């Protein structure tokens, strides 16, 4: 049975990804600050903050002793704050960078150490179209995901010799709590900039993630795939 680690599985896209891979017969190891919301015998949950280095290292140790290695990692956990830069406190900046950048880095580092043992692995990081579209009101969120993209490309080079691929997916807006506060006019203006002008769905994310995870995708690394025709 293949094992996949997915961060941010309590709700939103991460929860649906977890349920999808469970249905595909994978063992899913998830995490979030809150408790598990997925009752399934092949699902294991760690309640932690992805930016807490000690907790992430302890989780990796536990996975190593129970499973030996992991096949894939989806760095889905993320937070956003939509606000004008002049109204954004440093505390918000730090929280976003800690979760989106530090959290993604820590999971890449610790899970790559486990994947190293099996000489294969797939890492998929989560970015957003807010970065290439330079969306107003999302300066810190977009900057944090720009960092995730840079991390993705450089780790792809560093981990290639271990036969680990590192790619990213950049969804367009998908109905979750993350975007609940975005005003309707802003959302319509955003959709108008996509080639395919509809809301994204989790199935769009799954389609791209599945592509990255395939055994045949061992020559696909350091790539960022935006949905909806954004470039
Ligand atoms: N929805 C969209 O329109 C959209 C568009 C582009 C990109 N994305 C990206 O897709 C990913 C998932 O977004 P979503 O829409 O599903 O968001 P969401 O509905 O707000 O869910 C976020 C998930 O991450 C977990 N999480 C947040 N901070 C965490 C932390 N510090 N440590 C551990 N877990 C944490 C949350 O659980 P807890 O609260 O229990 O921690 C939750 O399960 C994010 O990386 C986001 O940037 C989303």
Image (cartoon, rainbow, N blue to C red):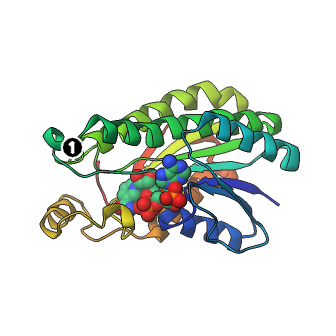
Image side of residue 216 versus residue 90, left or right? right
**Compared with residue 12, is residue 105 higher up or lower down, i.e. above or below?**
above
Circle 1 Cα neighbour tier, 10 Å, few/some/many (<14 / 14–19 / ≥20)? few
Image side of residue 131 versus residue 226, left or right? left
> Looking at the image, which residue is at 78% across and 67% down?
42
Image quarter where the N terminus lies is bottom right
When asked about the image quadrant of residue 100, the answer is top left
Q: Which residue is mark 1?
A: 134
Instruction: Tell me if I can see residue 208 in this picture.
Output: no
Q: Position of residue 139 (x, y in %)?
A: 24, 41
**Compared with residue 14, is residue 71 higher up or lower down, i.e. above or below?**
above
> Looking at the image, which residue is at 38% across and 42% down?
96
Image side of residue 184 versus residue 65, left or right? left
Q: Nearer the viewer, residue 184 or 190?
A: 184
Number of on-image labels: 1
> Looking at the image, which residue is at 62% across and 55% down?
31
Q: Position of residue 27 (x, y in %)?
A: 76, 62
**Compared with residue 175, is residue 73 higher up or lower down, i.e. above or below?**
above
Q: Position of residue 148 (x, y in %)?
A: 44, 37
Instruction: Tell me if I can see residue 87 in this picture.
Output: yes
Image side of residue 157 versus residue 12, left or right? right
Q: Nearer the viewer, residue 213 or 186?
A: 186
When asked about the image quadrant of residue 204, the answer is bottom left
Q: Position of residue 107 (x, y in %)?
A: 61, 40
> Looking at the image, which residue is at 64% across and 30% down?
160
Local secondary structure at mark 1: loop
Q: Nearer the viewer, residue 62 or 24?
A: 62
**Compared with residue 68, is residue 172 higher up or lower down, i.e. above or below?**
below
**Assess mark 1: CB under 8 A from ligand 1?**
no
């Amino acid at each position: 049975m293949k094992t996949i680690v997915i961060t941010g599985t309590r709700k939103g896209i991460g929860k649906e990804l977890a349920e999808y891979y469970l249905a595909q017969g994978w063992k899913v190891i998830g995490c979030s600050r809150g408790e598990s919301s997925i009752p399934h015998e092949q699902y294991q949950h760690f309640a932690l903050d992805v930016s807490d280095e000690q907790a992430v290292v302890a989780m990796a140790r536990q996975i190593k002793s129970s499973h030996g290695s992991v096949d894939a990692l989806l760095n889905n956990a993320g937070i956003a704050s939509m606000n004008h830069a002049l109204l954004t406190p440093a505390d918000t900046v730090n929280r976003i960078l800690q979760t989106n950048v530090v959290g993604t880095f820590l999971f890449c580092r610790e899970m790559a150490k486990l994947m190293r043992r099996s000489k294969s692995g797939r890492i998929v990081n989560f970015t957003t179209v807010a970065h290439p579209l330079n969306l107003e009101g999302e300066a810190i969120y977009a900057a944090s995901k720009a960092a995730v993209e840079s991390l993705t490309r450089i780790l792809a080079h560093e981990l290639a010799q271990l036969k680990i691929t590192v790619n990213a997916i950049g969804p367009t807006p998908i109905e979750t709590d993350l975007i609940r506060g975005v005003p309707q006019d802003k959302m319509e203006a955003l959709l108008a900039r996509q080639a395919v002008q509809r809301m994204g769905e989790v199935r769009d994310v799954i389609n791209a993630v599945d592509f990255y995870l395939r055994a045949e995708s061992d020559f696909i690394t350091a790539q960022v795939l935006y949905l909806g025709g954004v470039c």
